[in-house]
Image (cartoon, rainbow, N blue to C red):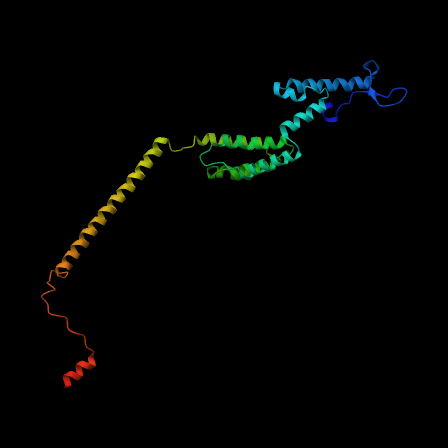
Amino acid sequence: MAVEDGYDLPKMTPGGGGEEVLKPKAQWNAQEFEASKWNRKAMHAILCAMDKNQYKLIQNTRIAKEAWDILEIAHEGTEVVKDSKLQVLQTQFEMLKMKENECFNDFKIKLMDIVNQSHQLGDPYSNRRIKQKIMRSLPDRFESKVTALEENSGYKDMKPSEVIGRLLAYESRKGPISTPTKKQKGIALKASKDEKEAKKIDLDEDLALFVKRFNKVMKFRRKGFGSKGQDLKKKGPFKKFEPRQERTERKGV
C-alpha cells in the first residue's frame, strides 16, 4: 500500500501562516501513525532485498515509494527502455523454435524465461497464446501428441503448465533423443573424405589414359599413317574435285 499509493510525511501550517513545515511526531493522529507504520514496513522489506551496490542507490531516501521508483528505473529503465526491451522479447518469442535434437525441457526453459521477463515489464502473455506458441514450435516427432492434445475436449481449459507436463511425460516415455556421437561424425567425415579422394584418383587415371591414347594417335599422324596403320604418303595425290557438268562436257569432247 505504501509503495502503490506513496507516503508523505505529515505536515502542518504554522499558526501565523506561511509555508508548510513537518509536523512534530507528538502531534500526529492515529491515521498518520498508521500510514507511517506501513511506510516503514515497506521500506524494511525493500532494504532486506538489497545488496551493497543497490543500497547505494536508495540510501538517502526514507520513503518506500521513492525507493521503489529509483530501483524500478535502475533495473527496468524508463518507459522508452522498457518498450525497447519488450520489442526484443516479442521478437525472441516469435522466433523461438524447438530444434529437432533439443529436449523439450530446454525449450520450455527458454520459452518461460521470455514469458516471465515480459510479465515483469508489464506485458504478460495470455495462457492461450503460450499454448499456441508451444504447439507451433514443436518438431515433427511431437506431431502425434500435439494432435491428441488439440483433439482433447478439455484442451481449451488447460493451463500452459498442464500442457508442458503432458509433453514432458510424452518425451520421457519416448526415450532419449538419438544424436550422432563425435566418433560417428568423425567416421562419416573420414568416409566422405576417402570417397572424394578415390573419385579424384579415378579421374586422374582416366585423364592419363586419354592423354596417352591421344599422344599415340598424334604420333601416327605425324608419321603419315592412317587410323588402320596405312601409309598415307604412298598414296597418289588427291584428285581435283570437278563439278558433274564439267566432267560430262570433257567426256563428250
Quadrant in which residue 236 is drawn: bottom left
Residue 58 against residue 170 in the figure, above or below: above
The quadrant of the rendering that contains the N terminus is: top right
The foreground one among 22 and 41 is 22
Residue 180 against residue 223 in the figure, above or below: above
Q: Residue furthest left?
A: 234
Residue at coordinates 76% horizontally, 18% vertically from top-left?
36
The answer, for residue 51, to whether it is visible in the render is no
Answer left or right for 15 relative to 95.
Answer: right
Q: Position of residue 39 (x, y in %)?
A: 74, 20
Residue at coordinates 34% horizontally, 31% vertically from top-left?
183
The answer, for residue 88, to whether it is visible in the render is yes
Q: Position of residue 12 (x, y in %)?
A: 84, 20
The quadrant of the rendering that contains the C terminus is: bottom left
The foreground one among 215 and 79 is 215
Answer left or right for 218 relative to 22.
Answer: left
The foreground one among 147 and 57 is 57
Q: Residue furthest right?
A: 16
Q: Position of residue 147 (x, y in %)?
A: 52, 40
Residue at coordinates 34% horizontally, 33% vertically from top-left?
186
Quadrant in which residue 224 is drawn: bottom left
Q: Position of residue 57 (x, y in %)?
A: 66, 22
Answer left or right for 114 relative to 171.
Answer: right
Tally of numbered tags: 0
Q: Residue furthest top?
A: 26
Quadrant in which residue 251 is drawn: bottom left
